Image (cartoon, rainbow, N blue to C red):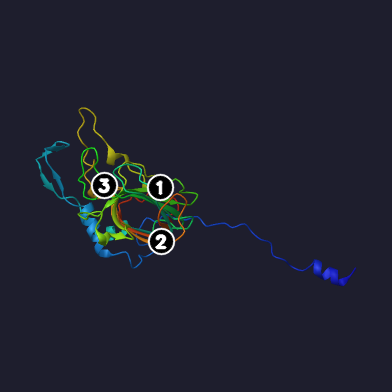
């Protein structure tokens, strides 16, 4: 046999393997990955003061066998360790484009997508995110019964963890103006588009998986039943409540998307607090 051919036939080779991504983990604690420099403790403290603010009632409230007259009542306050646990942040670089408004009280529809890139977050190692914004047609308009968002930016933020065991997890947060800030304030616009807003964890129960809402937080007493002490009093048992701020930087491009006006790259940063139960995470090594 030809020794040259024999040598070539036995030469080692490398075979290609299909890519396999490791499962990502939704972390229970806020600091498991460390916080980037743009996450500000002062903002987190402001969010905590809002989430756990005293509750004011205007009618007599009965809890069990006790009646409480109208007044202002404090709620349990989070410890520093609890604020650390609740800390939530995410950042992604995606694509944005500005389209036509959907309704007469809007000036435009702004779509922002993570565009196939992973979201950087202390909530998950692999995820996708979307943000939609509806700037108002008249920033000076006042909210009314039939238009409660008049004059304000309205929107929705979503986060979808991309892993096998927690593919059912989804986060939805409602977006609006920051408190007492007009929607057309130049300081809160970037390239004429809304750039600084607030969010609250969607209270309608649309979220799922890691962000599922315990039944007792939305419990409605039936006829003849008294309100349980854990119903809607916020504070320590107000699981699935969350709030924070959103900052967006727009980098326009000269190449417009078909049917859209301005478009380009968007850098989205989100920070705040979320009081999650911490029991809906099958990958967390600290528990399992």
Count of picture labels: 3
Let me know if residue 121 appears in the view.
no
Residue 144's x, y, as percent?
Answer: 20, 41
Q: Which mark is residue 252?
A: 2
Give the position of the N terminus as an image quadrant. bottom right
Q: Looking at the image, tell me whether mark 2 or mark 1 is earlier in sequence order.
A: 1
> How far is mark 3 from mark 2, CA to CA?
41 Å
Q: Of 93 and 239, which appears nearest the observer?
A: 93
Let me know if residue 73 appears in the view.
yes
Q: Which residue is mark 3?
A: 238
Q: Of 164 and 270, which appears nearest the observer?
A: 270
Label 3 Cα crowd, 10 Å radius (few <14 / some 14-19 / many 20+): many
Residue at 79% x, 67% y is: 10
Residue 95's x, y, as percent?
Answer: 44, 57
> How far is mark 3 from mark 1, CA to CA?
19 Å
Disc 3 secondary structure class: loop
Residue at 23% x, 60% y is: 45
Q: Which residue is mark 1?
A: 170
Q: Looking at the image, tell me whether mark 3 or mark 2 is earlier in sequence order.
A: 3
Disc 2 secondary structure class: strand
Residue 260's x, y, as percent?
Answer: 42, 51
Image vertical order of residue 21 relative to residue 227, above or below: below
Q: Which mark is residue 19?
A: none
């Amino acid at each position: 046999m030809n020794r040259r051919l024999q040598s070539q036939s036995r030469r080692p080779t490398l075979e290609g393997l299909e890519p396999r991504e490791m499962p990502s983990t939704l972390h229970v604690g806020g600091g498991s990955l460390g916080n980037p420099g743009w996450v500000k403790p002062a903002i987190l403290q402001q969010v905590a003061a809002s989430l756990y603010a005293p509750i004011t009632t205007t009618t007599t409230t009965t809890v069990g066998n006790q009646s409480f007259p109208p007044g202002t009542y404090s709620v349990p306050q989070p410890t520093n360790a609890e604020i650390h646990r609740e800390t939530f942040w995410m950042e992604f670089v995606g694509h944005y484009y500005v389209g036509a408004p959907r309704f007469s009280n809007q000036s435009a529809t702004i779509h922002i997508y993570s565009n196939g890139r992973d979201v950087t977050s202390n909530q998950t190692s692999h995820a996708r995110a979307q943000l939609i914004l509806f700037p108002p047609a008249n920033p000076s308009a006042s909210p009314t019964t039939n238009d409660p968002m008049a004059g304000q930016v309205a929107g929705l933020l979503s986060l979808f963890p991309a892993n096998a065991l927690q593919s059912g997890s989804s986060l939805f947060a409602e977006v609006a103006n920051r408190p007492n800030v007009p929607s057309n304030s130049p300081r809160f616009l970037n390239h004429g588009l809304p750039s600084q807003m607030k969010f609250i964890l969607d209270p309608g129960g649309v979220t799922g998986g890691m962000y599922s809402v315990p039944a007792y937080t939305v419990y409605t007493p039936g006829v003849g039943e008294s309100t349980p002490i854990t119903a809607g009093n916020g504070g320590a048992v107000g699981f699935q409540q969350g709030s924070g701020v959103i900052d967006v930087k727009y980098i326009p491009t000269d190449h417009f998307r078909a049917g859209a006006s301005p478009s380009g790259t968007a850098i989205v940063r989100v920070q705040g607090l979320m009081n999650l139960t911490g029991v809906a995470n099958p990958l967390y090594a600290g528990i399992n």
